[in-house]
Image: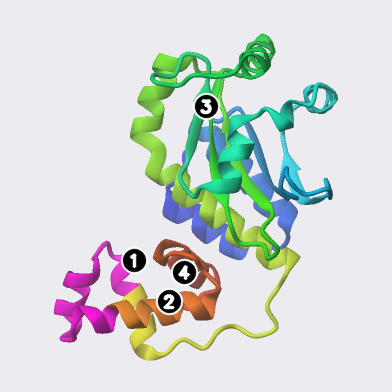
Amino acid sequence: MQHSLADFTDRLKHAVDAEEVWRLSLSHFGDRGAAWLYHGYTAPLWHHDRSVYFSYSSIPADWDRYREQQGYRHHDPAVRHCARSSAPFPFGTGLEGVRYTAPVRKMYAESADWGAHCGVAFPLRNVPGSPVGAMVCITRMRAPEFQIWWNESRWELQIASLALDARLLQFYSPADDVPDLSARERECLLWLASGLRTDRIAHRMGISSSAVDLYLANARRKLGARTRDQALLKAVLLGMLTP
């Protein structure tokens, strides 16, 4: 049975360790068409340090080793994109409006030989020190099928990726204290969770839009989140938004 996004985030919240988070994620994303997943943080390409801070992967080890031997990481447009942008990056042979260098075309052609055709990389920014973080979903879908899948699933996949990232990081760098959100900050996040945006939240709470922006900015700061959506996910996973 395929679980909803709400079920997935609830299961993440009750996971006892990082390995259980990863197992739940493999199941959730697999049910939605992802054949392989990668989640991790590494040093940026322009750093001399090539260390991996931590990572989880279901990509075949043989292909991973071969990719490293060929130096594909230095050509991979997804890696470069994730170092510079917060927007998702669909990739693969045949996607409309995308041009690749010769090494990248070779890399994708060789990936297709073992069944990996198109995928998407979600940049992550939650580890200090400006490392490159990414959640990568790789599919067996060729470009036409993938494009339909991506158009239909992109928002749910992105939110699920952020939820997975937030929960994994709690096991790697658990906070000593849960942030203390004010009643107004919690209420703004609760209305945000219900799908309302600034003007509608302001109307429901009887305050100005600028006050809503201030409360949400404070919540982001306290939770160490870059965006409202990340703040919302972290608050949910920490159990802070029970009405």
> Which quadrant: the C terminus?
bottom left
The answer to whether residue 141 is above or below residue 229 is above
Span of residues in magenta: 190-212
Instruction: Please tell me whether mark 1 or mark 4 is closer to you in this view.
Output: 4
Question: Mark on residue 241?
Answer: 2
Real-space Cα separation, disc 4 to disc 3, in angstroms: 28 Å
Q: Are marks 1 and 2 in contact (CB under 8 Å)?
A: yes
Q: Label 3 neighbourhood size at 10 Å, few (<14), some (14-19), many (20+)?
A: many
Real-space Cα separation, disc 1 to disc 4, in angstroms: 10 Å
Label 3 element class: strand
Would residue 187 be visible to someone looking at this image?
no
Give the residue pinned by disc 1.
193
Would residue 108 be visible to someone looking at this image?
yes
Q: Is residue 6 left or right of residue 161?
A: left
Label 2 element class: loop
Locate residue 219, reporting x and y percent: 44, 79
Real-space Cα separation, disc 4 to disc 2, in angstroms: 11 Å
Locate residue 29, reporting x and y percent: 54, 38
Give the residue pinned by disc 4.
231
Residue type at mark 2 is Leu
Residue type at mark 4 is Ala
Give the residue pinned by disc 3.
91
Q: What residue appears at the point 44 percent right and 19 percent down from the top-left corner?
A: 95
Label 1 element class: helix
